[in-house]
Amino acid sequence: MKKNWWKILAALLLLYTILAGFLIPLKSGIEYVNKDNVNSGADFEVRAYCYNTHFSEVDEIRAWLKIDSSHIIKAKEVKAVGNLMADISFSLPQFLPNNKSHVATLIIDNKKDGYAILPSAIQINQIAFDTILPEENFEYVSSLDNELITINSLSFPYRNILYETIRNLFFHVPLWFGMLIIFLVSMIYSILYLRNKNEIYDMKANAFTQVGILFGILGLVTGAVWARWTWGAWWSFDVKQNMSAIAMLIYIAYSVLRASFDDVEQRSRVSAVYNIFAFSTLIPLLFVIPRLYDSLHPGNGGNPGFGGEDLDDTMRMVFYPSIIAWTLIGVWVAQLTYRYLILKNKLIYNRNNKNRHKN
Amino acid sequence: MKKSILLVCALLSTHLLSAQESTQSVMESSGKIFVVLATVLVIYAGFMIFLTVIDRRISNLERQIKD
């Protein structure tokens, strides 16, 4: 029992990941608005379609249009239409800052849901006026700092397109982190084999590689599922997808290579060298090449990784334990595999010995 | 036994194919939470298959030890 504490830890952490990953609610957010173009100097009403909001349960909903950091227009009136919709009316100044058209951000908040932001929500066009009002004293709100209501309960960030699938961060991403650690361990065993020529190291490297391939294939499939309903296709030939598929093929070739040798020592030696080569191609394939090209995948080609507001403290609270959990589960399965391999090896060894005695 | 399983699979797959549009709407509903469920099920299936393979190998080994 004492020796297996990390297996219990793995099971508990995985349970925590699944429970917290599914049960912590998402923050509220604005999905879209029904107007994207308005003219300066006009009064207009826009309907905001929101996610996870409880408008009919609160007394007051506030809303702003943010033109830039020091020019913010407060809504005249916000009417709740059910829980998820709000009709917001604004009146715009005749002349916008710098006399230019602007793209404004919509911000809504209330006491129950906290605040929600829709960047680039509405384009406000500066139009020419025949009659210019003599004196326009439009009142902007100069800053929203300390003004917006934030809620302190545990919640994951809301992102358009992603919605609840942001939770996949605890299931898809740790598979790749775990795979990397498992392949690293496998490579270390291969190096140890080359130094000591102990068959057990080779078997351990083999087992860890098998589990790494399992993790990688699951990572590819879960990524394809996630991509189908966020990027729009199972496989969009994105550079990250292609390169990780190539990395998997290189590792599958390791298994094929092993199967093609009859001589045990030769098999162990060649596959250990190949394993070191495979790991050294893994790093550029997964972390260098995708960064050099345009990619849909977060963290690549001008596309920021999950960071800042995407990976907030609540996300980290589940994300880091999930990496440990999946890695430990992988090590556990790898251990079962190499224990099997070692037993099989012993059986073959004993049988060969017996045969020799008979002869 | 095998035939009946195949039959059920075939029926299910044609049903799924004809219901592809409703699959789409299910996956997009409730904030796409079913995408997360599908992801978890994929991982579950992957681990189950891997464990079954190891299980079968160990059974093989046990049979060899008996012989």
Image: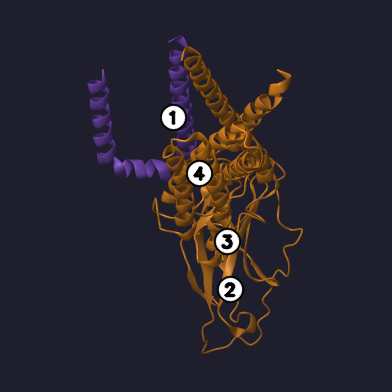
Which quadrant of the structure image shows residue A58? Answer: top right
* Residue in front for this viewpoint, A214 or A51: A214
Alpha-carbon distance for marks 1 and 3?
32 Å
Locate residue A138 relative to residue B8 in the image: left or right: right
Tag 3 residue? A288
Mark closer to the observer (4, 2):
4
Identify the amino acid type marked 4: Gly
Which quadrant of the structure image shows residue A185? Answer: top right
User: Horizontal and vertical percent for residue A138?
Assistant: 66, 76
Colour of chain B, in one word, is purple
| Residue A224 position (above or below residue B59) | below
Alpha-carbon distance for marks 3 and 2?
48 Å
Classify mark 1: residues with Cα within 10 Å, few (<14), some (14-19) or many (20+). few
Tag 2 residue? A92
Looking at the image, is mark 3 or mark 4 earlier in the sequence? 4
Point out which mark residue B49 bears: 1
What's the chain of the residue with tag 1?
A: B
The residue under the point 71% across, 56% down is A148
Colour of chain A, in one word, is orange
Looking at the image, is mark 4 or mark 2 earlier in the sequence? 2
Which type of secondary structure does the marked residue at label 2 adopt? loop
Identify the amino acid type marked 2: Leu
Alpha-carbon distance for marks 2 and 1?
62 Å
Residue A61 shows up from this direction: no
